[in-house]
Image (cartoon, rainbow, N blue to C red):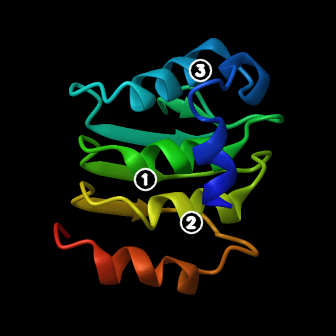
Amino acid sequence: DFDYYEARARDVKFEDITSCDGNAEILRRLRDQDTSLNDIRITDDDWGNFIVEEGDDLGWLGYFIGKSKYVNELFIYSWEGGQNKEAFIDGINRNQSIKSLTICTDLGGSSFQYLCPFFRNNNRL
């Protein structure tokens, strides 16, 4: 639920919602609207910049991507082990800066149809 994340965003402790320091840094940069963070590569191996492991709350990642004004490209290569995938999709549905979305994994229970608001509301694609 977007309101849950909105109410807690200022006080969230990134070490409590991510599996590693690198993921915490990505969330911090998104929250702080870092203008140099132009792409997010979500994967479960070392070549992504957000590496999904057990304990990663993807709802927070989606929330901060949704609020970002600077992320231009989003790549979802894999997200096994991540939690709150529906909240992640709800967050990215609110994004207005993404110009390119690449999905190379099974969305599982989070059906592609849940991305309809993203495609309908994003004029940059």
Residue 3 lies, with reference to residue 119, above or below; the image says above
Disc on the earlier residue, 2 or 1: 1
**Badge 3 element:** helix
Q: Is 75 displayed left or right of 11 in the figure?
A: left
Of the pair 46 and 79, the residue shown nearer to us: 79
Check disc 3: other Cα within 10 Å, few if <14, some if 14-19, many if 20+: many
Rendering coords of residue 74 (x, y %): 38, 51
Disc on the earlier residue, 1 or 3: 3
Rendering coords of residue 1 (x, y %): 68, 61
Question: Which residue is drawn at the image coordinates 63% and 43% (left, top)?
Answer: 7
Question: Which residue is drawn at the image coordinates 32% and 40% (left, top)?
Answer: 39
**Badge 2 element:** helix
Circle 1 sits on which residue? Answer: 66
Circle 2 sits on which residue? Answer: 90
**Badge 1 element:** helix
Circle 3 sits on which residue? Answer: 24
Mark 3 residue type: Ala
Mark 1 residue type: Gly
